Image (cartoon, grey):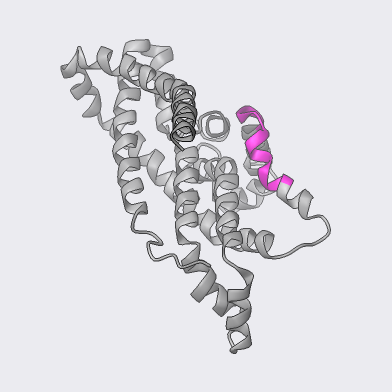
Amino acid sequence: MAQTLVLRDRCLVSFSLLGGVILGLTVLALLNLTVKELADIPHVVQVAADAKVIDSIVLTMGAGANAVAILMIFGVPLAYVLARTNFRGKGLVETIVDIPLMLPHTVAGLLVYMLFMKRGLIGAPFYNIGFHFEDAYPGIVIAMLFVASPYFVNSAREGFEKVPVHLENVARTLGASRFSAFRHIVLPLSARDIYNGMIFAWGRAIGEFAAIIMIAYYPMVISTLIYYRFTTSGIKESSTVAFVMIIACFAVFMTLRYLSRFIGRHDDRV
């Protein structure tokens, strides 16, 4: 028994060391930037108080939230269908859902731009009634939605698949409709997975650059602003903006992770 525990501990230590390489790389990159920025705190405060930086961060996070809200409306039904049904061509549908994961960001941006530009298949009718996607807030949201959709749909689908089908079947034999069973049983039991999918999708959305810049250079999201400051003012100015964004993201994601503890706490899946 003692020898088995030692072997298990060795395995755990080995895995921790190997996994620590990835963690260490992220920590090292963050520390490298943090040390340099804290050496000039007045400059950090000045950049953090810059109205353009604040507006850009708020714009980025707000657009990401809007993209996730749209994903919830259309992504939850899609995820449920994929989790609960088997049909000819399901593999093709799942591949289409995952395509934004595999595409280079510039390709994703080109696809979005060609569809929503002023002469695009979707963009043209909207442009004719005065609704713009190019260099406009809706274009940012659409680009974010496109690249973030697989994260939300796949996470929600995994949550739905964890809920035993027999729970729905019991509810339906008692007179509940499929939608009622979904709303009262499946959705609550999948809340944590859906919430995590929202976090992943939102994080992916606010981190996008190439897809956004191709359809909407203006108004500037934070990634575009950082690129602009880098090309016009150099690394010092852009790195400080990046540092401010990292602090904002760290605070927001820590809060979201903390709140996730209270989502689906009484998950009684069997």
Residue 116 appearing in the image: yes
Residue furthest out toward the left:
42
Image quadrant in which you'd find residue 148: top right
What residue is shown at x 59% (from left), y 54% (from top)? Answer: 158
Q: Residue furthest right?
A: 88
Residue 16 place in picture, x, y as percent: 44, 27
Residue 242 horizontal side relative to residue 113, left or right: left
Query: Please, is residue 91 above or below residue 266 in the view?
Result: above
Q: Nearer the viewer, residue 108 or 192?
A: 192
Q: Is residue 147 above or below residue 198?
A: above
Q: Residue at x 52, y 41 (%)?
A: 144
97 on left or right of 167: right
Indicate yes or no whether the magenta region holds residue 193: no
Q: Position of residue 135 (x, y in %)?
A: 51, 36
Question: What range is drawn magenta here?
Answer: 95-107
Please tell me how many numbered marks the rendered image carries.
0
- Residue 177 in sight here: no
Q: Is residue 165 above or below residue 88?
A: below
Residue 151, quarter of picture: top right
Q: Residue, x 51% and y 73% (percent of image)?
A: 185
Q: Indicate the position of residue 246 as horizontal and vertical percent values.
A: 34, 29
- SS majority, magenta: helix
> Which is more toward the observer, 105 or 83?
83
| Direction from residue 27 to residue 129 in the image, left or right | right
Residue at image point 43% right, 24% down: 20
Whether residue 9 is situated above or below residue 79 in the rendered picture:
above
Q: In the image shown, does 265 or 186 lie closer to the viewer?
A: 265
Between 158 and 222, which is closer to the camera in this rendering? 158
The magenta stretch spans residue 101:
yes
Residue 263 x %, y % = 38, 59
